[in-house]
Amino acid sequence: DIGQYVKSVDVLTVKGERFTRSGDELSFDYRTSSVNELAILSCELELTFADADEISKKMRQIWIVKKAAQPFSFQSAGCIFKNHPQHRIGREIERAGLKGKRVGNASISTIHGNFIINEGGARAADVLELIQEIKESLELVSRGAVKPVVMNTFPLEEANRAQELIDKMELSGRTSLV
């Protein structure tokens, strides 16, 4: 939990104003924080000293566990949905039979159900459609709302238009919104 180490955060508001938040203005919890401005420009961390070998050993252990359980050989946006306090969304996606489901070139990972992977040339619309299908399927079987970690702050039509513009550029094939 990095929040425990954050001393201050420099932010940019939607009005283009830059300011620093610190102390009581900052709070952190599971996949949430009180920092909700347009952009985080920088932050100051207050860290403690630890043995470099111990840190490296712990990092290797974490990497081994994550590599075995997450689709690191594909491009993805990471976990798509927040976990519920009582259960893991990835397991719920698997129980719903959604692992491997595909829209365009985006698919729900067969390794970890809470990852949507880009199999090459996936579009934002593909990913957003999969997110919607997962939400609808899980909300039928779960009691609480399924909350995405990935926030769509623009209409799907804008995502499609942006992708069309990218496709017309020389960068087509090397660039996507996913």
Image (spheres, rainbow, N blue to C red):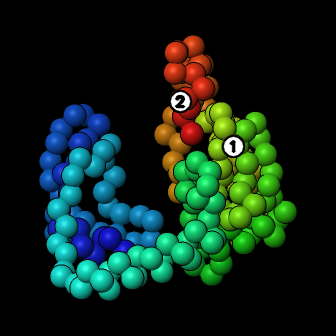
* Residue labelled with disc 1: 119
Compared with residue 41, is residue 24 higher up or lower down, i.e. above or below?
A: below
Q: Quadrant of the N terminus?
A: bottom left
Q: Position of residue 100 (x, y in %)?
A: 79, 55
Do tag 2 and tag 1 residues touch (Cβ < 8 Å)?
A: no
> What amino acid is labelled 1 in the image?
Glu
How many tags in the picture? 2
Residue displayed at 79% across by 46% down:
102
Element marked by disc 1: loop
Q: Which residue lies furthest to the front in this view?
A: 53
- Res 144 seen here: no
Compared with residue 137, is residue 47 higher up or lower down, i.e. above or below?
A: below
Circle 2 crowding by C-alpha within 10 Å: few under 14, some 14–19, many from 20: some
- Give the numbered dot on residue 144: none
Of callouts 2 and 1, the N-terminal one? 1
Element marked by disc 2: loop
* Residue labelled with disc 2: 175
Q: Where is residue 34 in the image (x, y as percent from the top left)?
A: 32, 61
Q: Position of 25 compared to 147: left or right?
A: left
Q: Quadrant of residue 145 in the image?
A: bottom right
Q: Position of residue 119 (x, y in %)?
A: 69, 43
Residue displayed at 54% across by 34% down:
177
Q: Where is residue 74 in the image (x, y as percent from the top left)?
A: 62, 51
> What amino acid is labelled 2 in the image?
Thr
Q: Position of 19 compared to 72: left or right?
A: left
